[in-house]
Amino acid sequence: MSLSTSVAALLDAYMSEVFPATHAPGMQVVVVDKDSVRYARAFGDAVSTNQVTGIGSLTKSMTALAIQQLGVDRQAPVTQYLANLHVPDWVTIDRLLTHTSGIATQATLDNIIVNAPGAFEYANLNYHLLGLVIQAVSGENYDYYMRKHVFEPLGMWNTTADLGRVTDLLTGHTVFFGKPVPWRMERFFPNRMNNEARWGNLSAGFVLSTAHDMGIYLQHYLNNGVPEVPDGGYRDGWFRDGDRIFHAGSLEGYSSFMMLLPELGVGVVVLTNMQDYVGNTMSGLRIEAGITNILAGRQPSPVDRGLYLRRHGLLSALYLTIMALPLVRCRHKTIWNVVLPTALLSVPRIVKARWATVWGFAPNLLVSLVASATLLYAGWFTKKTKTR
C-alpha cells in the first residue's frame, strides 16, 4: 500500500523545505511498511535511493542481529568466545549488546579500559568485540558472514562492509568552517576487523548501504517483531523513546538515521552524505520528528532555516578566537605560552577522543587547536632565545 497522494505531497513539501536547511549535498529518504515502500525520494547529489553511503552506527543493530542468528549465549562472558581477550568475566555478551559492560567510550582493542559494569556507556569497542565473536563462532570474516547470512538473504544487494566491493559510493562531505567539503572515506575505512588501534571498526560502524536496502532491513523487523528495548534504554543496537525505536549514525563524511514506529506500522530511514558532528544540524532540525508528525496526520514544526548558519557562524567565531590567542599580550609569559597551548592540545583527551577521531569529525577544531598551540609555543621559544 502506498501513501495517499496528500500525505506523499506533504512529505515532498516538507522535505523540499528541510533539505536545503541541512546544507547537506545529498539526502535519501525512504518510508516502508511491512509489505512495501511507501515513500522514496533522493535529493541533491543523491540521484536515487540506491546510491551507497556510509551508515555509521546503524551497523550496530546488524551486528546484534548476527549474534542472535548464531545463537551466541548472551549471559556468557565474552572470553568464552575470545580466549585471548583479557577482560573481567563481567564483560558478557549481553552487556556488550547493551553498552553496560563497563568498557569506556574511548577504549580500543589495544587499550581496553574497563570500569565497573552496569551503567550505560556508549562504546564502539563493545560492538567491535561482538564482531570478533561473530568471526570466532562462524569461522568466517565479518563482511562475508554478514553478506551471506544477513544482507543477501534479506535482498540487501547493495550492502557490504567491504569498501572494495562498492563502485558507486556517494562522495562524503565534512563541514570545514561552515562549508561542506568532500571527504574521502578511503582514508578512514578500516581494512580488517583486528585493527587494534581503531576507535571504530567494521562491526561498530562501517557497513555501507543505501536507503532502499535500509528500507528492506526495517521491513525485516516490521514483519518479524520489533526489537524489545526498554523505554529510555538501549538494547541490541537500538534506542527507545516512547513509541520510537531508533538509532542514528555518524561517520567521516556521512550521517544517518533509522526509526521504527510500531504503532503506525512503518519504518523511516534518512541518509546524507555530510557529517556535521559538531554543528549537529541534522539532529537540531529534527527531520525524523517532522516525518513522524506527517505520517501520524499531525502538522510538522516549522523548519528553522537559519539553524545551520547560526550554529556554524558561532563555531567559526570560536575557532577563529582560538587561533587568535597568540596575538593576545600577557605579562605571564610562561603561563600563556606554555600552559595554555598544553591545555589546548589536551582538549581531545578531555572529551575522550583520539586525534584521528577529531580530524575525522571536527577538522576545523583540530586545525584551530594545533595552529594556536604551535604559535604560542613558538612565541615562548623565540622569547627564551632572545633573553639568552
Image (cartoon, rainbow, N blue to C red):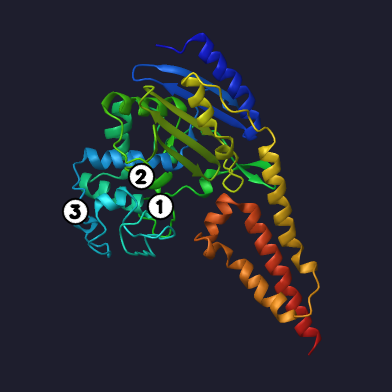
- Classify 10 Å Cα crowding around label 2: few (below 14), some (14-19), many (20 and above): many
| Residue 243 coordinates in the image, percent (x, y) | 39, 32
**Front-most of residues 100 and 319:** 100
Q: Does 381 sit above or below residue 155?
A: below
Tell me whether the residue at label 2 lies in contact with that at label 1, contact meaning CB atoms closer than 8 angstroms: yes
Residue picked out by circle 2 = 234
**Secondary structure category for the residue under label 1:** loop
| Residue 203 coordinates in the image, percent (x, y) | 36, 46
| Residue 89 coordinates in the image, percent (x, y) | 22, 62
Q: Residue at x 41, y 36 (%)?
A: 246
Which numbered disc flags the more N-terminal residue, 3 or 2?
3
Residue type at the position of mark 3 = Ala
**Front-most of residues 238 and 304:** 304
Q: Gap in Å between the C-alphas at discs 3 and 2?
A: 19 Å
Tell me whether the residue at label 1 lies in contact with that at label 3, contact meaning CB atoms closer than 8 angstroms: no
Q: Does 168 sit above or below residue 162?
A: above
Residue picked out by circle 1 = 122
Q: Does 130 sit above or below residue 39?
A: below
- Is residue 185 visible in the rendered image? The answer is yes
- Is residue 49 visible in the rendered image? The answer is no
Quadrant containing the C terminus is bottom right
Left or right for 237, reference 375: left
Disc number for residue 170: none
Residue picked out by circle 3 = 76
| Residue 380 coordinates in the image, percent (x, y) | 74, 78
